[in-house]
Image: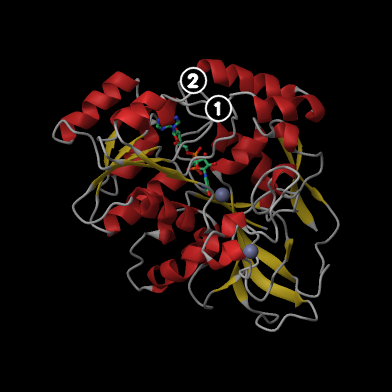
Amino acid sequence: MKAITWHGPQDVRYEEVPDARIEEPTDAVVRITSTGLCGSDLHLYGPLAPFMTEGDVIGHEPMGIVEQVGSAVENLAVGDRVVVPFNISCQRCWMCRRGLNSQCETTQNREEGTGASLFGYSRLYGAVPGGQAELLRVPFADTLPVKVPVGPSDDRFVFLSDVLPTAWQAVEYAGVGEGDTVVVLGGGPIGAMAARIAAHRNVRVIVAEPDEHRRSRLESRGVDTLPAGPTDALAAAVRDRTDGRGPDAVIDAVGMEAHGSPVAAAAHKVAEKLPGPLGRPLMKSAGVDRLEALTNAIEIVRRGGTISISGVYGGATDPLPLMQLFDKQVQLRMGQANVRAWTDDILPLLTADDDPLGTEDFATHHLGLDEAPEAYRAFRDKEPGVVKVVFHP
Ligand SMILES: NC(=O)c1ccc[n+]([C@@H]2O[C@H](COP(=O)([O-])OP(=O)(O)OC[C@H]3O[C@@H](n4cnc5c(N)ncnc54)[C@H](O)[C@@H]3O)[C@@H](O)[C@H]2O)c1
Ligand SMILES: [Zn+2]
Ligand SMILES: [Zn+2]
């Protein structure tokens, strides 16, 4: 089968790899029809390079048609249309039963000290072959894939693998409701979808994003935006719009590769070039996140407010202004999305006639899988208009 494989920092390739196949009687193999390119893939393209192995199949936002099921699978049949959540969770363990699917105790990576395995996401998360491929092996076939109806286009459902539940959890963790105000840092796919979900719940939303093309795209849907410039200017602009107090919550939809953190950016460049055995301990033990977005979140959130972090961070000794956090009485929630815990809540919005979250025009690019190497580069460089790419293998 053809797949996208990792070969080094800024080097992904479209190439032939062995077909995905049933390995356990509880597996299914899905023929992928749509598969997204995510901001998280960019971390593999750069700072998480020390945790990658040449030839790893990447991608974690797939959907498609079931092609084969293992002998013990009862709830899934060949021909079913499914979306595959990016975290691999069993739905049976202590964590899964509490809706903490990203901490699944059946797939946790104890040697690495990390949570549930993820599709296509480095040795930190199980080194499981990913979904930017023609075929994908899906474990826990009875309970992990989300069955979706046949008929509507893939665009309605494909974002259920990651963007929708991640943005949904960001808004849930922000703890905002009707009449509250949330500032979303980052107007990429996650920030844009979090803004749509918050607005759908009648929460007032302001998105701060440095890129003017991304801001205009948001504005064309009626979203209030701000340029995400230096901290003082951003904080003043936000306070101006929030009675001098700051928003009830801030969602950080940026993560470790924020613009405006030059020292950490340089450290990333060093770590990603080192061979794995040297780069891994450096990434795990040194404070190498680019913290611009998070420190801005701490600065602008109102006293007693909440910061909800969905941007991915990876540093172990990041310096944080604890006095400010404590004194402002800030609540912090964060983590990988517990995808399967939210999908049943989201699905009815995707099948609704009026498509309230605008899934049908959310992707900016529909490309062949062979176009992925160029798309990774354009997405990383934030080329104007390249916001959400979906590949069709
Ligand atoms: N928690 C999860 O389960 C989960 C799931 C998916 C993605 N993510 C993470 O969410 C983050 C966003 O993903 P995405 O797909 O939207 O990626 P993206 O890279 O397209 O979006 C990031 C956006 O942040 C903007 N930005 C950069 N620096 C900023 C700053 N200082 N202030 C405000 N905005 C800034 C960029 O211009 C960009 O538009 C990534 O870190 C990704 O890894 C987390
Ligand atoms: Zn993703
Ligand atoms: Zn589990």
Nearer the camera: disc 2 or disc 1: 1
Where does residue 131 sit, x and y in percent of width and height?
68, 56
Callout 2: CB less than 8 Å from ligand 1: yes
How many residues crowd mark 2 within 10 Å: few (<14), some (14–19), many (20+)?
some
What element does badge 1 sit on? loop
Who's the residue at 29% across and 49% down the image?
A: 221
Side of 175 where 49 appears, left or right: right
Residue that numbered label 1 is attached to: 289
- The quadrant of the picture showing ligand 3 is bottom right
How many residues crowd mark 1 within 10 Å: few (<14), some (14–19), many (20+)?
many
Who's the residue at 47% across and 58% down the image?
A: 165
What element does badge 2 sit on? loop
Which of the labelled discs sits on residue 261, or is there none? 2
Could you tell me which quadrant the C terminus lies in?
A: bottom right
The answer for how far apart the CA atoms under marks 2 and 1 are is 8 Å
Where does residue 167 sit, x and y in percent of width and height?
43, 52
Side of 180 where 136 appears, left or right: right
Could you tell me which quadrant the N terminus lies in?
A: bottom right
Residue type (three-letter) at the residue carrying disc 2: Ser
Question: In this orientation, does residue 170 appear?
Answer: yes
Side of 185 where 157 appears, left or right: right
Residue type (three-letter) at the residue carrying disc 1: Asp
Q: Which corner quadrant of the image does residue 100 belong to?
A: bottom right
Depth check: give the residue in front, 166 or 319.
319
Who's the residue at 41% across and 27% down the image?
A: 322
